[in-house]
Image (tube, grey):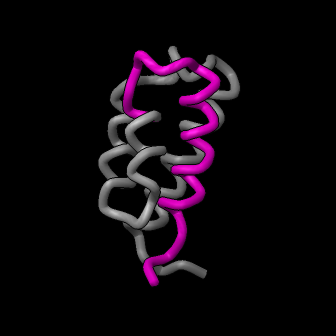
């Protein structure tokens, strides 16, 4: 069990955003929500290239969606 409330809230936010992307597509999922995940991911060991693709609204939706999946996985791992 994870007793870190910040990590738990990040996991909830990632999960909520993943469902929104599934339902509405990444273009309509909420820029502020994506910005929040990007900001958190930049404080982790997540790939900077994937973070940049996710953050860049001019990238193709497929690329951003795939980047979200990888960033979400990498950013939600416990710190080493």
Between 2 and 36, the one nearer to me in the picture: 36
Which residue is at the far right?
22
Q: Taking 58 as reference, is 42 above or below it?
A: below
Identify the residue at horizontal 48%, vertical 44% (top origin): 50
Between 5 and 24, the one nearer to me in the picture: 24
- Determine the main secondary structure of the stretch shown in magenta: helix
Q: Is residue 66 visible?
A: yes
Quarter holding the N terminus is bottom right
Whole-percent x and y of residue 30?
44, 23
Identify the residue at horizontal 44%, vertical 67% (top origin): 7
Q: Is residue 33 visible?
A: no
Which residue is at the far front?
49
Identify the residue at horizontal 41%, vertical 69% (top origin): 5
Examine the image and state in which quarter residue 21 appears. Answer: top right
Q: Taking 66 as reference, is 42 above or below it?
A: below
Examine the image and state in which quarter residue 9 appears. Answer: bottom left
Magenta segment: does it hold 68? Answer: yes
Whole-percent x and y of residue 64?
54, 30
- The span picked out in magenta is 54-80
Q: How many marks?
A: 0
Q: Is residue 46 left or right of residue 40?
A: right
Q: Is residue 24 left or right of residue 32?
A: right
């Amino acid at each position: 069990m994870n007793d870190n409330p910040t990590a738990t809230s990040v996991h909830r936010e990632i999960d909520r955003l993943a469902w929104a992307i599934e339902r509405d597509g990444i273009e309509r999922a909420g820029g502020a929500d994506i910005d929040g995940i990007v900001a958190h991911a930049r404080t982790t060991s997540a790939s900077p290239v994937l973070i940049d693709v996710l953050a860049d609204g001019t990238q193709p939706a497929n690329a951003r969606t795939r980047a979200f999946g990888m960033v979400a996985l990498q950013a939600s791992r416990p710190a080493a």
